[in-house]
Image (cartoon, grey):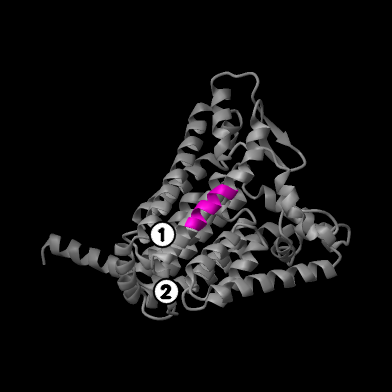
Amino acid sequence: MTDGDGREASGHRIRRFLGTRAALWTGFALVHAALIWLNLTAPGYPLGDVTAVYRLWAENAAHGWLRMGIDAPWVYPILAFAPMAAALALGSAWYAQTWLAIVTVLNAIAFSVLIGRARLSRPRRIAAWWWLGFLALLGPIAFGRIDAITVPFAITGLLWAAGRPRVAAALLTIGAWIKVWPAALVAALVIAARRRFEVLTVALSLSVGILAVSLLAGSGANAVGFIAEQAGRGLQIEAPLAVGWLWQIVAGSKSVRIVYDRQILTFQIEGPGADAAAALTTPLMAIGVLVVVLIGIRAVRGGAAFGRLLPPLALSFVVVLMLANKVGSPQFVTWLAAPVILGLVFRPARFAVPSLVAASIALITHIIYPYWYGWLLIADPAFVFLLTAKSLLLVVLLVWGIRSMWRLGSPRAARSSAADAVRRVPDLEEN
């Protein structure tokens, strides 16, 4: 055997191994171990919200002093308290480690659903490796906020949407009552699914049940206080709309500055027009969501198959929430994982562009936060440029999603979509 033949055989063995469950689980363990280590040791205080804020809320409730969302208005929906309280299981000293263990277990459950128990198809292998790469590129923020709890619910819900829409609706609704954003995925499912009435019934019934339990616990209007709390925020520096003001600071403007809001615990823009821009985000988001809804409905009426419509529809909803957002925190990037994974499971080649763009957004976010976040706080030109690039890449994702849905609404695309659904939907329903 020649050296060339030996290298080819070795490469073939490596490729075969990378396609196995053993390789995927090894990759899962390595990526999660690295992210846990970074969260516990990296500079920039990546677990700041978890150890300084979540733990305080959980301890106050455990001592009977104050239950956020029940005794007082809260920035999060009521179910967000469940993982925060669960992280106290091993005591306050181990709060950070317990939190990271909870995130890892939830991710492992979603990962097991993704790769399944039946034949491991090539699209699922690609999606699994992409998710691991995405987490590695995004860095510690992928674990260090409440959003990390909702992502596995979103991924599992979307993967089960074709074959188990009621279970999917339940998972996505629970996710929405932890952090609001999975509600967009519920909306996507209602539009794209044939059994949309069942999805809507499950989502509404479960929401009513959660609200009822909250009211019985004594929450009163605090059960939905997160709506008003979010409305009261200013324009946070990471928000896409804040880019213009950051460039004014770079240009030397004395009327624009970055300030710290001690009530919301965020860095915000203070300057002419900033408050108006913050107020404008809500109607902008409503308009963006409406546009996505209308284009999604057009695609459904045009005969678009469920499996081809749901990924770009879910992605478009998520990106609208990110672009038209006055907060724009780095952890929001974790939301992109669920629709991209679904798209890669269904049609890897078609979702190559959004998967690469989302990975690029993750990398940019990791560069900015947490290690060198201080440079953004002083509006360093290089970091303002990175934030600008990140916002533009989000626009690229939205344009791609809307363009894909618009094409699905044409008669020719509908015929192709129906034929493709026959081949691909069983893979979404398996396992």
- Split into 4 quadrants, where in the image is the N terminus? bottom left
The residue at the point 52 percent across, 32 percent down is 384
Tell me which segment is drawn in magenta: 286-294
The residue at the point 38 percent across, 74 percent down is 425
The vertical placement of 75 against 236, above or below, is below
Q: Earlier in the sequence, mark 2 or mark 1?
A: 1
Q: Position of residue 145 (x, y in %)?
A: 63, 54
Quadrant of residue 186 in the image?
bottom right
* Residue placed under numbered mark 1 in the picture: 130
Farthest residue to the left: give it: 2
The residue at the point 60 percent across, 19 percent down is 253
Report if residue 159 lies within the magenta region: no
Count of labels in the image: 2
The residue at the point 66 percent across, 70 percent down is 204
Q: Could you tell me how far apart the alpha carbons at marks 2 and 1 are, in whole angstroms?
A: 17 Å
Q: Position of residue 152 (x, y in %)?
A: 55, 65
